Structure formats: C-alpha cells, structure tokens
Amino acid sequence: MSALLPGLLKLFPGRSPRRGADPLGTVCHPRGDTPKKRLDPKVGGRLALGAVLALAPSVRASMPEGWQALTVLKADEALRGFDAGRASATPAGAREADFGRAVALLARQPVTPDQVETARRLFAALAGSGTDDAALGARYFLGRIAQHHQEHADPAEAARQFRTLIAGHETSLWAQAALTRLALLELYPVNEETPPAGRVAAAERLLAQAHLPVAQSELHLVLADAIFYCELPPAGALPHLLAAEQLGRLDAPTRADVLVQIAEVSGLTGNPIQARRFYGTFLAEFPLDRRRFMVVQKLKGLDKK
C-alpha cells in the first residue's frame, strides 16, 4: 500500500486553518477558538478520506468500488464494495479491505459509538499483525480515534499510539502525519502541569523527526500558534514563522497570515527592514485582502521611525 500515500500529508492536516487572529493576523491568541479545538472532531470523517484520495490508480484497481465510493463520500456504498472485495481477496487484499472498511466507518455519517468501536477493533487487528502500510495507517487511526473520534477522548492513548508509530517507522508518511497530532497533545494537555515554555520546548524537539517539508511546515506553524496562544515572548515564534514561509508549503490564506505575522513580530522585535520586506510581499501577493489598508498604515508608521 505504499502507493496509497503520496500527497497524504496534504489530506491529513495536522492543524486546521489559522483562525481567530485579529484582522492583521498578529500576535494575539485566538479569540473564541482555543488550539485544543483547532482540529475539529466534526471533520474527522473528511480527514479519514485523505487515505482514499491519495490512492494510486494501481492500488485502487484492486477494490475500485470501495475506494471510488469513498472519494465521493458514499460511505455505505464503500462498505458494500469492501465487503464484496474481501470475499475473494488475497491475504494482502483482505487487509486492504479491512483497512478500507474501518476508514469508511469513520466517514459514515452520523458517526456512532458502535461504528467507532468497530473501526477501532479493525485497526487494532491490522496494527498488531504486521508492519505493512495497512498496519502503519491503522496505528495512525488508532491515535486519531483516541484523540477525537471516541465518545471520551483519551489523550494519553492517542499520544502512545503516535509515539509508537513515530519510534518504529519515523520516515513513513503515516509517522510524519502523526508528528503534528502529537505536538498538539503535548502543547495543550488536559492537565497543564508543565509551564507553557516547557511544553513548547518539548514539542520543538519533534522537529528533529520531521523529514518531509510539509511535516516540518505544519510543526513550525503549530509551534508559532502555541507561542502566541500561551502569550510567550513573540520573538520565539519568529524562527518558526520564517521557517514555514521558506518551506513554501502554505496555502494562500495561511501564507497571507504568516507574511503579516512575520512583519508584525519583526517590527515588535526591532527589525524594521524585515518588517517592511514582509509587509511589501503581502501587499504584492494579496492585493484584495481586507487587511491591505491596515498594512499600508503599518508601513507608513515604520517609515516615520
């Protein structure tokens, strides 16, 4: 199933779109949206479909009915397709069918506790019986279920699943996708016994295990968000914002936010040249953005200094 995974990280984002910042996207913490909620459990079914949308044609051909139904959000049809395909499948095909069935159960609306439990059991059997892509994907989803899908979230179990996946298969795309999920669990624990600076430092250590640019970018953005949210010195967010911008893996709305935030923090930390450069880049790339007038005023203020 290694052919399933190209482009996976785009479809399994570790963070939701940047929300709740002020009109300039500056260094205040989110309003009305805590980062604990940044990964909205309501979109869990859509996130699960990332595995389907990333399938290579050669793999989809083995059980086309199931995968094609999932790509158009027809979970019931997908379940029938996987069940039919499993009846005559090879052992590898049976594992693919079980994996597809479990993903479809998470995508079927409304998601019920019984569905989640059935999916969990399928994923647990796959994760415990091999090291193929189905097993790695299953362990990723076991973490996701513990983190968001089950009725009572179990952050400790989610973190355990993600750490096991990363420790054993660090360079796999499933492990790379798990890094940001694990970072969020470390940054926003249920019992906040560790001071915010310590939580950020712990999450920053995950960067050493991020090997794909998209995983690196996601981690840098999550870390910058946490520094702002926890009201730590904004200078600490600047290297993360610069790194994310330089990696070039940002969608347009996120890039607009990052450009303005880099400029804002640069101005706050005594680097007006860099602030002007990133304000100018923002104005050139986003001429219709609603923050344009305010950015122009910021630039005029810098020119007076």
Image (cartoon, grey):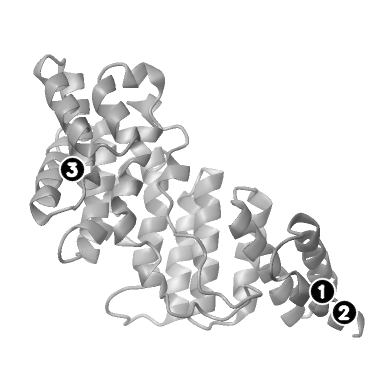
Q: Position of residue 124 (x, y in %)?
A: 14, 43
Relative horizontal placement of residue 283, taking residue 76 as reference (left or right): right
Direction from residue 212 to residue 44 in the image, left or right:
left
Q: Is residue 116 above or below residue 195?
A: above
Residue sitting nearer the eye, 121 or 285: 285
Quarter of the picture containing the C terminus is: bottom right
Of 110 and 167, the residue lying toward us: 110
Instruction: Give the SS element for disc 2.
Output: helix
CA separation, marks 2 and 1?
A: 6 Å
- The answer to whether mark 2 and mark 1 are in CB contact below 8 A is yes
Q: Which mark is residue 296?
A: 1
Residue at point 18%, 43% (across, down): 105
Name above or below for residue 216 compared with residue 54: below
The circle on residue 36 is: none
Say which residue appears at 42% left-offset and 56% top-offset.
Answer: 180
Residue at label 3? 105
Q: Quadrant of residue 27?
A: bottom right
Q: Quadrant of residue 291?
A: bottom right
Q: Amino acid at mark 1?
A: Val
Neighbor class of circle 2 (other Cα within 10 Å; few <14, some 14-19, many 20+) is few
- Disc 1 crowd rating (10 Å Cα; few below 14, some 14-19, many 20+) is some
Mark 2 — residue? Answer: 300
Residue that extends furthest to the right in the rendered view of this protein: 304
